[in-house]
Image (cartoon, coloured by chain):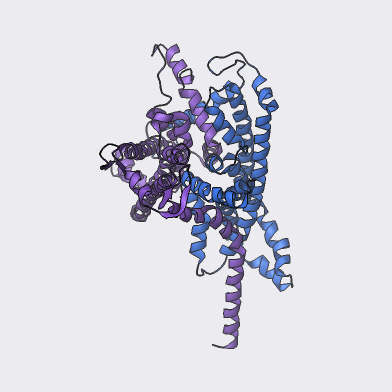
Amino acid sequence: MSRSRFDIRAQPGFGFITLFTFFALYLPIAALVVYSFNGAESLSQWGGFSSRWFVAAWQNSAVQDAAIRSLVIALWAAGLATVAALMAALATTRTAPYRGQTLKYALINQPLMVPEIVTAVALLIVFSRIKVWTGYSGLGYLVLAHTAFCIPFAYLPIRARLESMDLTLERAAADLYATRWKTFRHVTLPLLRPAVIAGFMLAFVISLDDVVITEFVKSGGQDTLPTYMLGQLRRETTPEINAIATVFLALSTVLVVIFFFINRKKQ
Amino acid sequence: MNGAEQAAAAARKQDIRSRWLLSAPALLIIFVAAVGPLFVMLLYSFMVKGDYGDVKLGEFSLEGWTSVFFQRDIFDDTLGLADAHLSIIWRSIQLSFFTTVLTVILGFPTAYFIATRPPHTREIWVFLVTIPFWTNLLIRTFAMQQVIRNEGLLNNALMWLGVIKSPLQIMYTDTANLLGMTYVYLPLMVLPLYASIEKLDFRLVEAGYDLYATRFQVLRRIVIPLVRPGIVAGSILVFIPSLGAYVIPRVLGGGKNMMLGNLIEMQFGSGRNWPLGAAMSITLMVLVTVALIFYVRNASRGGAGHV
């Protein structure tokens, strides 16, 4: 077969546009990372290679607080969302259709359908009223709000995995007099483990990344890392923001790579 | 009904009940922290605004809704169209539309190119699209700012090349909004397009060439009609978040180039007009729903391509 054979799949210029697309996707990120190693006082000039802004960010107590708060909220929200999504996935798969099942799907996926700003404003309205009534203004509101929009993301991989499993193994366990809990604990859950981990990680990244809902729900002094950064962007920014963004970027890339490999092994 | 059937029916009933119990936590959380508040917001949009934000509970008025579209003239008290609001709503629709067009122009050839690579390389390309997709939206917006700001990459490069003498003011313009949204939402276009092109039956393309079609004719008459569901899905995935964009116009567009999301936020901040903000949010939801209905109708018709 000669190389010059007419390729029916080729289209002129598509390769070039693809290269441009990837260049455009990665160039801004590269610029952000490069500038985080800028030794100068401000972003407007280049002051030589330096890691001083990473040190500055690391020692900034506002950044530390925000980072810890982000992690705490993400752990709680992803944990709760994964448990709720696992239960919901067990409840909505591997059965003949029943009344209300479509309603369940619609409800579980609802957070994906509504623009974030709308949910954010609606939560602001409701939570501000509850804050006045109860006097409680802790992190609970943020955890609850994050859990809600994390559920569809945790649900997705778990449901997909369940739908590719049949009930044979569970029936065998039941034939051997295993209780429903024992069957779940020793048969279903181990089979689901990769999907549960994937769901948790998706939810974790989604919670960690959230800006809009957090910005509207948080009380004073409850900045997470993204809302802290958003607040800083209003001013003349220093490369410190780049340093924070670079670390953040590295963290979520690592999570996505792990997620990718978990999913690949499954297939 | 005999005994066995009865027992089976009872077991089925029991099963459904336990399935409701199992899904209860997820449904409850979503109801409390996502769906329920939307209804409360609908209620708030019909209330009288409070003096310092919030609303006067229990006092109803249509003021919030009328002021989305109309405003009272401060001199002669006549009702006129609220130009400021309408132009922002219109701008949001326009910008979202152009964002969608730009992402199709870049995304379609990219998705096509990836889908026609050998399977192993394909996976790597897709993975490279996924990474920016999972990167924090704020960070990507900020990254775009690094490129287009006055001392940014683009201006420096153009000045170094001698194309321009002084930096182009891109930040705080509609162009900045457009570039930012195209950049941020591009993966949302590429991924569904890729999924649909990957399933394309290239025997049909071959048949087209056998009938002496040119490359362009094959693209226009065979490939594009067949992958239309993917194009529509990608367009919806880009159009809807663009319409509700908040972070991108706030960071890149600045105060003069607000979009609907920022206008809504303003009513809850300095505007202190919660009913108006609530009514605007619902207007945004209606716009999104219209787009979704358009999608569902097109997606069901899109099947026609798969003869």
Image point 39% across, 43% down: which residue? B235
Q: Nearer the viewer, residue A112 or B41?
A: B41
Residue A109 on image: x %, y %: 51, 54
Q: Is residue A169 above or below residue B43?
A: below
Q: Quadrant of the N terminus of chain B?
A: bottom right
Image point 34% across, 44% down: which residue? B67
Q: Which chain is blue?
A: A
Question: Farthest bottom residue?
Answer: B2
Q: How many marks?
A: 0
Residue A18 appears anywhere in the view: yes
Q: Is residue A137 above or below residue B259?
A: below
Residue A194 on image: x %, y %: 66, 51
Q: Is residue B153 above or below residue A15?
A: above
Q: Nearer the viewer, residue A140 or A203?
A: A140
Residue A14 on image: x %, y %: 40, 33
- Compared across the picture, whether B266 is left or right of A79 comes to left
- Compared across the picture, whether B158 is left or right of B127 comes to left
Residue A206 on image: x %, y %: 58, 43
Image point 56% across, 68% down: which residue? A95
Q: Quadrant of the C terminus of chain B?
A: bottom left
Q: Is residue B90 above or below residue B1?
A: above
Q: Nearer the viewer, residue B212 or A73?
A: A73
Q: Which chain is purple?
A: B
Image point 55% across, 31% down: which residue? A231
